[in-house]
Amino acid sequence: MPLAQAQAGETMLVIRVAADPKLRKHLENLGIMTGAELTPLSQKDGNMIVRVHDSRIAINKELAQNIIVGRRPSFA
Amino acid sequence: MKIALIGNPNCGKTTLFNKLTGSTAHVGNWPGVTVEKREGLYKGLKKRTAEKIEIVDLPGIYSLSPYTPEEVVSRNFMIDEHPDLVINIVDATNLERNLYLTTQVLEADVPVMVALNMMDMVEKSGDRIDVALLEQNLGVPVMPISALKGTGVDKMMERAIADCKPRKGVTVIGDALKAEVAATLDFYESAEVSSPLFHAVKLLENDEIELERKGAKELLEKISSDKDLEAAVVDERYKHIVTRLAVAKVKGKRDNMTKSDKIDKVLTHRVWALPIFAVILFAIFHVTFSEDFLYIGAWAGLGEGLPALSDLGLSEGMETFVGIFYDGAVFSPGVILQKAFEALFDLITDGIGGAITTEWLSGLVAEGVLGGLFAVLGFLPQILMLFMWFSILEDSGYMARVAFVLDRIFRRFGLSGRSFMPMIMGFGCSVPAMINTRTLADENERTATIRVIPFFSCGAKLPILSAIAGGICTFFGVGNADLITYGMYALGVCAAVVCVLLMRNTTMKGDIPPFIMELPAYHRPQFKNLMLHLWDKTKHFVKKAFTIIFASTVIIWLFSHLNWSWHYLTDEQMNDSILASIGKFIQPIFTPLGFGSQLNVYGWVFAVAALTGLIAKENVIATFGTLGACLIAMGANVGGVTGAELLGDEEGIISSVAMITATGISIPALISFIAFNMLTIPCFAACATAKGELKKGTFKWTLLFWVASSYVTSAAVYTIGAWWWTLFIWLAAVAGVVTLIVLNNKGKLKLRRHKTEQAEAI
């Protein structure tokens, strides 16, 4: 599902990032890339704050819709 | 010895730089790009080392890929300038992300040291970092420090000087890409470039700069064979970081929410974020500018009301003293400071004015020089205070949140939330505000933002507002000076919004780049940094007052006391002066704005004041002071204002009253005059900055934009104010323009659709 629909507080796994190369590179630099874990912290009108590797990143709605995330496989 | 500091934004790099260099820092620009370059000399260990240690602060970056000018600058410096040591500052509270850059830095053939910053925060949160293990796995010295508290910094520098040996680049990329790295490394080694490994890995990352090298593209195509090497490299880096490096950090037991998260819960709240910001903004302006602090006077006004200053029956000296704090209401701290300054200047002016007896000289000194200078310096406290509040908001990390919160709204006007910061800084001074637009990625968005920044009325324009607003209230006895001032601020913001909408739909179209921004952890602003900021600002302001403004006031005084054959004119003969004839010449231009030919024989003073404002906005009121004195001497009907009163008039209210009486100007024309000065071409300094920051060829259009927008707005203010029914004409004109733009944009869309339809048909 798109990151924009993820629940606050639940750690998700990035499945795909749909963005042009430049933007994708920038997201990679910030640690947002396929296989990375991120946790949405809060949402405001679709704009969200996520936690990636101990840092807080603010992302606007359109971008959050282009980052596809899934639940982490549970090891329990 | 040359040491470069490299690291992520918000990692504490600048704090460390300030700590290392103290006051020796020199700020400039990197050649060819608008990226700030900071250099300085290491101030510690002076006795033990004969050699000077140069410190270069590279811009904050997340990686060394060449997508932003900051990244290119840092990369070129590291590879080509051969610094003796690169200190990579790593935010220990955010180890994994920060080490991503470190893995790239290590690939270059330069000596590297890692400074593990914010160690105190790590310990506080209950985490622990095994520094020795990290050093072992990284293969370069690692020193724990706290740049904020200064702990470990000296030790780090000692080791930096002692331990700095030439070093070969090392990569963390493992077996998965061994063959590919070997192939590209071979290519670069045979080309004999410096740091071949760095270039080799960058080529695998599909790096734009590397691909320009002859033969590189072909090589990459040959070895990539459908594999996404770029993603693989990133993956390898993070994998190495997680498995080998970040293991040095042992997370202590704690709840999942950090302090910053908890603060964010409130300050970026879905509903309350905007109201909270509005309250903070209001509080800042209230504390700085209000003459009725906490509305004590207004509250009291509901009952008996507080007595005015003159009704207190105080002795003269006591009245002056109390007048600093109180007049029918308690002043806000900003106003108290300003009044204190005024009182001080009064003393100085009285002392000097009395000492000089030669008529023309005392005129020049008292009116020309002191009048102008004090009119400007009197506002220093309030300007500094406003600046201080914004610095605090910025340093604490709150401004980044505000940009995020406002992003949604700004998008409606065609801007991203990032453009908010430069705009709000515009209230302080346009120059740093325009420089701050460098964070905007889209060129057209940046141009549009730079153009409207002067509309956010800066500190220097405040005197124009308060003097004329005060003049209107005193002379016409209507309205509330505060209300007019706030209203004019609002007018500026409205003009900015309208102009941005207009530009983004016509000449400055473009996609709004997506909003991604790291939100730094909240921290208490540092007193020392704040003072450094304020001191810089004070220096700049005082320097300006004693150079540009000083020179302008002297020139204005001279031109108003000399005729074309260079004969000295007394104050009474000012209408024959050079200045008067220039003023009269340009005066008709301002007729549609209400302060042109319709005024009487003295009306040219407004035209001159507007003209001098092009050099520095403080000049407008300085000119009022200089010319007001002449008007009084000429025996013009100035409403009983005396020259002595004028000298003690740092706020310029009395000189504006004198000018209003002498010229017979109307209220709408005065408001239009304020609006014109607020929106028109900003001061020299701002123009020079805009020219430097804007894309080549856009500056002349920017000048035209400023002239046009101020002229049209002022004309609208004047005509609607003077004849209310013209409102309908203006509305019709606006509707017409909007329709044209919308039709044009739609029309283009149709045209394009038409073409694609045709293409599909074929």
Image (cartoon, rainbow, N blue to C red):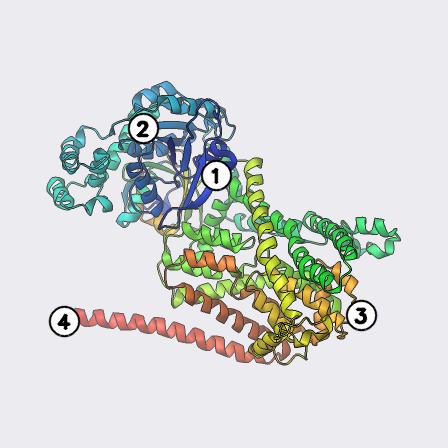
Element type where label 4 sits in the image: loop
Q: Which of label 3 and label 1 is nearer to you?
A: 1
Q: Residues within 10 Å of mark 3 (few under 14, many from 20)?
A: few
Residue at 17%, 69% in the rendered image: B760
Element type where label 3 sits in the image: loop
N-terminal of the pair, mark 2 or mark 4, is 2
Separation (CA) of disc 4 from disc 3? 84 Å
N-terminal of the pair, mark 2 or mark 1, is 1
Q: In this orientation, which residue lies closer to the viewer: B237 or B253?
A: B237
- Residue B762 is tagged as 4
Separation (CA) of disc 2 from disc 4? 63 Å
Q: Which of label 2 and label 1 is nearer to you?
A: 1
Q: Position of residue B274 (x, y in %)?
A: 53, 51
Tell me the residue that label 1 is attached to.
Answer: B25
Element type where label 2 sits in the image: loop
**Label 3 is placed on what type of residue?**
Gly
Compared to B370, does B706 lie above or below? below
Chain letter of mark 4 equals: B
Q: Position of residue B698 (x, y in %)?
A: 39, 64
Q: Residues within 10 Å of mark 4 (few under 14, many from 20)?
A: few
Residue at 66%, 79% in the rendered image: B599
Tell me the residue that label 3 is attached to.
Answer: B640
Separation (CA) of disc 2 from disc 3? 76 Å
N-terminal of the pair, mark 4 or mark 3, is 3
- Residue B749 is tagged as none
